[in-house]
C-alpha cells in the first residue's frame, strides 16, 4: 500500500527544504461543468447544458482534480515517482464519495490512456494525450538524491503539471469521466496493476509500432474518397491550426529563452556590482552600488517568476492543444480505417454475389443456397459497417465542436491569467526601482 507521507510539492516556485512539503497555493480549478465562464451568453450556456444532459451528466456536475505533490521511491535504477492526486466530485454518476485522495505512478497514467484509447478512439471519441516519456525527467528521477530533488525539480514539476492537465481534460469529457477505468484510477486507494505496454521494449509496444507502420501503408495504398464537404473543410482547418499553433509555440519558446537570458543578466550584473561595491573606498558610492546590486538581484527573482509563468501558463497550454490536435488527426484516420473496412466488405459482398450468380447459371442449387446464406450475412455486415461509419462521423462532429469550444475557453483563460501575472510582475519591477530611487536620494 502506498502512503502519502513526505511528499514533494508541485509548485512553479522553488521551496526551501525546511518548508512544509505539502504547501500548495490554491490551484486553478477546472470542473466539468461548462458554465464556468460568466461572460458566456445565455444561448451558449443553455446549449452547453443541453449537450451535457444529452451526454448523460446532470447540468450541475463538477469534477475538480488537483495533483498536489510527488514523492521519489526507491534508489538508483529502481527509483520512480508517485504523484498524490486529490479529487472533488459532485453529481457525477458512478462516484459514491465527494472526495478522493490517491497515489499513482507515471506508468499508471500511461496505462489509463492506453485503455481509454483501445475503448473509445475507434468510435470517434478524442482521448487526451498523456505526457510522453522524458529522458531528462527519467535521468533526474534515477540519479538525483532526495536533497537534490528540492533544488532541481523543474523538469519533474513540468511533468506533474502535464499529468494534471491530462486528468483534468479527461474529467471534462462527459463520456470518459464515467468510464470504469478512469473511475478506478481516481477512486481505488492502492496500487494499480502495472501495465505491460508502458515499457518501451515490451512486446505490446513492438506490436503497436508495427501496426502503426501498417496503417500508414494502408492509408497510402487505399486512399479515402471523401464525399463529406464538412470533413474536407475540417481537415484543412486542423492542418492550418496545427501549423499556426506550431509557429505560436516557437514564438513563446523564444519569449521564455529571452526572459531567461534577461534573468541571468540581472543576476550576473548584481554579483558584479556587489563585488565592485565591496572594493569601493568611497562609502557613499559603495552604498549606492550595493543598493543597485540588491535591486538587480530582486529583478532577477521577478524575472525568474515570470519565466515560470510564461512556461506554465502560455507554453504548456499551447502544447496541450497541439497534442489534442494530433489526437484529432488520429481520430480522423480511425474514420478512414472504418471507411476502408466498409469498402472492403462491400467488395467482398460483390464477389459473393458474382459467385452466387455463377452457381445459379451452372445449376448448382446446393452451392447457390449456401452462397445465399453467406450473402445474407455479408449484407448484414455491410449494413452494420455503414451504420457504424455514420455514427462515428456524427460523434467526430460533436467531439470537434466540443474541442473547439474548450480550446477557446482555455486560451482565453490562459491569456487572462497571464496578463494578470504580467501586470503583477511589472508592478513589482516598478516598486524595486522606486525603492532604489528613494534610497539613493536619502
Image (cartoon, grey):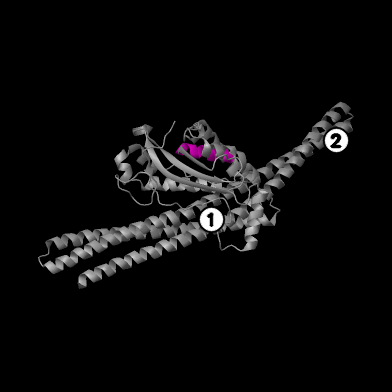
Principal secondary structure, stretch drawn in magenta: helix
**Within the magenta stretch, is there residue 316?**
no
C-alpha gap between disc 1 and disc 2: 51 Å
195 vs 25, nearest the viewer: 25
Circle 2 residue:
357
In the image, what residue occupies the spot 60% across and 42% down?
Answer: 178
x%, y% of residue 105? 45, 37
Which residues make up the magenta segment? 105-117
x%, y% of residue 1? 44, 30
Of labels 1 and 2, earlier in sequence is 1
Left or right: residue 336 versus residue 213 is right
Answer yes or no: is residue 238 visible. no
Tell me the SS state at disc 2.
helix
14 vs 385, nearest the viewer: 14
71 vs 345, nearest the viewer: 71
**Within the magenta stretch, is there residue 115?**
yes
In the image, what residue occupies the spot 38% across and 32% down?
Answer: 78
Amino acid at each position: 500500500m502506498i502512503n502519502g507521507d513526505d511528499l514533494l510539492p508541485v509548485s512553479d516556485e522553488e521551496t526551501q527544504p525546511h518548508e512544509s512539503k505539502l504547501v500548495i497555493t490554491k490551484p486553478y480549478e477546472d470542473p466539468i461543468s461548462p458554465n464556468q465562464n460568466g461572460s458566456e451568453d445565455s444561448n451558449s450556456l443553455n446549449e452547453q447544458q443541453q449537450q451535457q444532459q444529452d451526454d448523460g451528466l446532470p447540468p450541475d456536475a463538477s469534477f475538480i482534480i488537483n495533483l498536489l505533490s510527488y514523492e521519489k521511491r526507491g534508489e538508483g535504477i529502481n527509483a520512480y515517482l508517485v504523484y498524490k492526486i486529490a479529487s472533488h466530485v459532485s453529481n457525477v454518476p458512478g462516484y459514491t464519495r465527494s472526495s478522493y485522495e490517491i497515489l499513482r505512478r507515471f506508468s499508471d497514467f500511461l496505462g489509463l490512456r492506453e485503455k481509454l484509447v483501445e475503448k473509445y478512439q475507434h468510435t470517434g471519441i478524442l482521448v487526451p494525450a498523456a505526457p510522453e516519456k522524458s529522458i531528462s525527467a527519467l535521468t533526474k528521477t534515477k540519479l538525483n538524491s532526495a536533497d537534490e530533488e528540492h533544488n532541481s525539480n523543474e523538469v519533474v514539476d513540468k511533468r506533474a503539471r502535464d499529468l494534471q492537465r491530462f486528468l483534468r481534460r479527461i474529467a471534462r469529457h462527459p463520456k470518459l469521466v464515467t468510464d470504469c477505468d478512469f473511475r478506478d484510477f481516481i477512486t481505488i486507494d492502492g496500487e494499480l496493476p502495472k501495465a505491460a505496454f508502458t515499457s518501451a521494449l515490451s512486446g505490446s509496444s513492438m506490436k503497436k509500432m508495427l501496426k502503426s507502420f501498417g496503417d500508414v501503408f494502408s492509408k497510402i495504398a487505399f486512399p479515402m474518397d471523401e464525399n463529406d464537404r464538412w470533413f474536407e473543410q475540417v481537415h484543412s482547418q486542423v492542418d492550418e491550426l496545427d501549423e499556426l499553433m506550431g509557429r505560436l509555440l516557437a514564438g513563446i519558446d523564444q519569449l521564455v529563452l529571452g526572459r531567461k537570458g534577461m534573468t541571468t543578466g540581472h543576476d550576473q550584473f548584481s554579483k558584479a556590482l556587489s563585488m565592485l561595491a565591496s572594493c569601493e573606498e568611497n562609502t557613499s558610492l559603495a552604498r549606492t552600488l550595493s543598493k543597485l546590486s540588491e535591486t538587480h538581484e530582486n529583478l532577477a527573482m521577478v524575472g525568474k517568476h515570470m519565466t515560470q509563468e510564461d512556461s506554465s501558463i502560455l507554453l504548456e497550454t499551447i502544447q496541450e492543444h497541439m497534442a489534442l490536435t494530433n489526437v484529432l488527426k488520429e481520430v480522423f484516420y480511425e474514420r478512414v480505417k472504418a471507411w476502408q473496412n466498409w469498402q472492403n466488405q462491400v467488395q467482398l459482398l460483390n464477389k459473393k454475389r458474382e459467385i452466387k450468380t455463377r452457381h445459379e447459371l451452372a445449376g448448382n442449387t446446393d452451392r447457390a443456397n449456401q452462397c445465399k446464406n453467406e450473402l445474407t450475412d455479408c449484407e448484414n455486415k455491410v449494413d452494420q459497417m455503414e451504420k457504424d461509419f455514420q455514427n462515428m462521423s456524427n460523434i467526430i462532429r460533436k467531439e470537434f465542436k466540443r474541442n473547439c469550444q474548450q480550446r477557446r475557453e482555455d486560451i482565453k483563460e490562459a491569456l487572462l491569467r497571464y496578463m494578470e501575472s504580467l501586470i503583477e510582475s511589472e508592478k513589482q519591477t516598478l516598486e524595486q526601482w522606486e525603492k532604489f530611487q528613494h534610497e539613493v536620494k536619502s
